[in-house]
Image (spheres, rainbow, N blue to C red):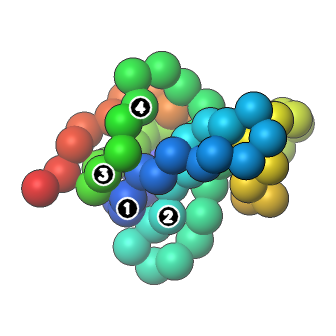
Amino acid sequence: MKLKGTIERVDLGMGGWALVTDDGRRFALMGKGLSPGPAEVEGEVVTDAAGFGMTGAPAFKVSQVSPQS
């Protein structure tokens, strides 16, 4: 699955990353090499994960990130 939006740093709890999609959905991101800004991410929604980021959003396991301008 591919999603386009903006990656944001979440500074609640242990911290983490979130993606706000162009259509307003929010996902807690799981993956490495993430940085803030516009991006397209590829991966899958994870329904059996627990996180510390306190985003209150579904988790998305990122397999690939492409920065967008």
Distance in Å between CA atoms under marks 2 and 1: 5 Å
Q: Residue furthest bottom?
A: 23
Distance in Å between CA atoms under marks 3 and 1: 8 Å
First along the sequence among labels 4 and 2: 2
Q: Residue at x 36, y 36 (%)?
A: 35
The image quadrant that residue 22 belongs to is: bottom left
First along the sequence among labels 4 and 1: 1
Distance in Å between CA atoms under marks 4 and 2: 14 Å
Provide residue 24's location: percent of width, then percent of height: 51, 77
First along the sequence among labels 2 and 1: 1
Q: Amino acid at mark 1?
A: Gly
Q: Amino acid at mark 4?
A: Leu
Give the label on residue 34, or none.
4
First along the sequence among labels 2 and 3: 2
Q: Amino acid at mark 3?
A: Gly
Q: Residue at x 36, y 45 (%)?
A: 36
Q: Residue at x 38, y 59 (%)?
A: 6
Distance in Å between CA atoms under marks 4 and 3: 9 Å
Q: Nearer the viewer, mark 2 or mark 3?
A: 3
Q: Secondary structure at mark 1?
A: strand
Q: Are marks 2 and 1 in contact (CB under 8 Å)?
A: yes
Image height check: is 35 above or below 38? above
Distance in Å between CA atoms under marks 4 and 1: 13 Å
Image height check: is 31 above or below 60? above
Find disc 3 in the rendering and name its residue: 37
Find disc 2 in the rendering and name its residue: 20
Q: Secondary structure at mark 3?
A: strand
Find disc 1 in the rendering and name its residue: 5
Bin the neighbour count of mark 2 within 10 Å (Cα to Cα): few under 14, some 14-19, many 20 and up.
some
Q: Nearer the viewer, mark 3 or mark 1?
A: 3
Q: Secondary structure at mark 2?
A: strand
Provide residue 21's location: percent of width, then percent of height: 45, 66
